């Protein structure tokens, strides 16, 4: 039976040569030999993001757990009211309490008024996330946090090569969290990193270095090899329909998974990240070309408004985000989907750790109701662009 062509919402590029290299690293025996894969990845991340310390982890969530423990040990962390449930999982594992601040639907950047209020209610740290590669106003939040005596964690899991004021997303810190998971731009199959910039201070830099040294022995990473191979084989539209039909993969679903104790980046994941980082800027540029083409073509479509970057922002365009005011239905076959289905305040796992009386977040509710993401990855063709524009222009309103 022929599987219909189906466009992935997002693609993390991986090459066959990178998969083979990761498999060779996973198969190698290291008795009496030094594995320098981590060292190379740490050096590359330090150079790219001007970091003073790097701890490589088995997931981006694990890196966020470490960041929360360093900034708010058994204290309170302010989270965006819109975001992935992994934010909650990290807070639960880190044993912190949570306050929420709102997000501006027009830019996906923090609502600074809401940030000020959340900090005023008491928070030891605040997480600022770059959604879909759109820059968040980390400097603006940092100024408010400094005045309130709180520390900033930059969640750069979805940074995808974006910049703000010419500075790479993820380089603002003082602590920055990265993810190398599926659908996050540069991929290791799984994995993450916690970076400390010079502004983190000597104590935090030392703590990040110590966290890296304290990791248990590294795994070979055969699971990451399998994930990367599957991304290469099934990530194309001609085959993605097969992957989407497998219920065990839960593609496109937002599912809460409890966070485990942070572990180290596997050898195979390090090999994949090492080969992916040099291509990140070129991949961002290719996505930007598709996004800018779609923005121009959709300019006159009623009630369909592309999310705009904040001043000085250059999006990474992990996905292209649009606000639909007319109730269009998603078109998963074209890769047009909704993302997080509800605000974090409505997630049942948050209830035990959120402070009572947190105010409503209307921006987050509006985003969940109106935001759609369009695919802009390497497999989006001119014909796909035309199909997206036709859908936006003529699809029946639901």
Image: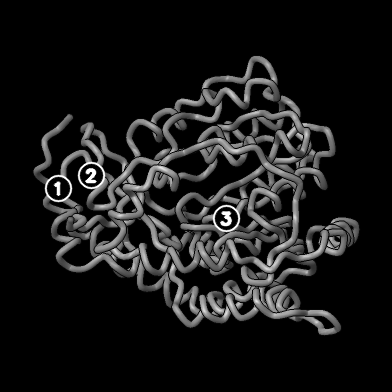
First reached walking from the N terminus: tag 1 or tag 2: 2
For the residues carrying marks 3 and 2, which lies nearer the camera in this image?
A: 2
**In which image quadrant can residue 96 be found?**
top right
Q: Residue at x 32, y 44 (%)?
A: 337
**Foreground residue, 168 or 280?**
280
Residue drawn at x 69%, y 48% is 64
Quarter of the figure with the N terminus: bottom left
The quarter of the rendered structure image containing the C terminus is top left
Image quarter of residue 90: top right
Badge 3 vs badge 2, beta-carbon distance below 8 Å: no
From the image, tell me which residue sits under label 1. Answer: 391
Q: Which mark is residue 157?
A: 3
What crowding class fits label 3: few (fewer than 14 Cα within 10 Å), some (14-19), or many (20 or more)?
many
Which mark's residue is nearer the viewer, 1 or 2? 2
Contact (Cβ within 8 Å) of mark 1 with mark 2: yes
Image coordinates of residue 133 in percent, x first then y, are 47, 57
In this rendering, position of residue 209 left or right of residue 314: right
Instruction: Kindly tell me whether residue 389 is visible in this rendering.
Output: yes
CA separation in Å, label 1 and label 2: 8 Å
Which x, y percent locates residue 317?
41, 60
- Percent across and percent down for residue 137 are 56, 50
278 shown above or below 211: below
**Circle 2 sits in a helix, a strand or a loop, which is it?**
loop
The type of colouring in the image is: one colour
Q: Which residue is mark 2?
A: 331
Earlier sequence position, callout 3 versus callout 1: 3
Task: Report the front residue among 70 and 6.
Answer: 6
Q: Secondary structure at mark 3?
A: loop
The x and y percentages for residue 304 are 23, 43
């Amino acid at each position: 039976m022929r599987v219909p062509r189906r466009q992935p919402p997002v693609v993390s590029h991986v090459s066959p040569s990178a998969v083979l290299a990761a498999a060779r690293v996973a198969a190698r025996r290291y008795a009496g030999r030094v594995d320098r894969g981590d060292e190379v990845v740490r050096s590359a991340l330090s150079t790219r993001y001007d970091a003073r310390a790097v701890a490589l982890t088995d997931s981006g969530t694990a890196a966020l757990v470490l960041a929360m423990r360093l900034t708010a040990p058994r204290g309170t962390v302010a989270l965006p009211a819109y975001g992935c449930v992994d934010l909650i999982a990290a807070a639960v594992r880190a044993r912190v309490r949570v306050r929420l601040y709102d997000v501006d639907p027009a830019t996906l950047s923090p609502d600074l008024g809401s940030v000020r209020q959340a900090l005023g209610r008491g928070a030891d740290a605040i997480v600022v996330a770059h959604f879909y590669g759109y820059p968040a106003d980390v400097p603006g939040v940092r100024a408010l946090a400094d005045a309130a005596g709180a520390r900033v964690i930059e969640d750069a899991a979805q940074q995808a090569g974006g910049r703000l004021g010419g500075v790479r997303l993820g380089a603002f810190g003082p602590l920055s969290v990265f993810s190398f998971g599926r659908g996050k731009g540069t991929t290791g199959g799984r994995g993450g990193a916690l970076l400390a910039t010079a502004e983190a201070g000597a104590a935090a830099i030392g703590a990040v270095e110590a966290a890296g040294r304290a990791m248990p022995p590294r795994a070979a990473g055969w699971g990451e090899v399998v994930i990367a191979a599957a991304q290469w084989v099934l990530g194309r539209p001609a085959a993605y329909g097969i992957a989407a039909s497998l219920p065990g993969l839960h593609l496109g679903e937002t599912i809460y998974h409890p966070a485990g104790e942070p572990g180290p980046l596997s050898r195979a994941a390090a090999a994949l990240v090492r080969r992916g980082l040099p291509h990140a800027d070129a991949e961002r540029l290719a996505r930007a070309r598709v996004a800018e083409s779609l923005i121009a073509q959709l300019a006159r479509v009623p009630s369909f408004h592309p999310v705009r970057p904040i001043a000085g922002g250059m999006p990474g365009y992990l996905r292209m985000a649009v606000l639909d005011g007319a109730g269009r239905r998603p078109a998963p076959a074209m890769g047009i989907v909704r993302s997080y289905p509800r605000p974090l305040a409505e997630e049942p796992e948050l209830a035990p750790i959120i402070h009572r009386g947190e105010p409503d977040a209307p921006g987050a509710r509006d985003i969940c109701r109106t935001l759609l993401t369009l695919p802009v990855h390497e497999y989006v063709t001119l014909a796909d662009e035309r199909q997206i524009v036709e859908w936006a222009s003529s699809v029946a309103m639901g």
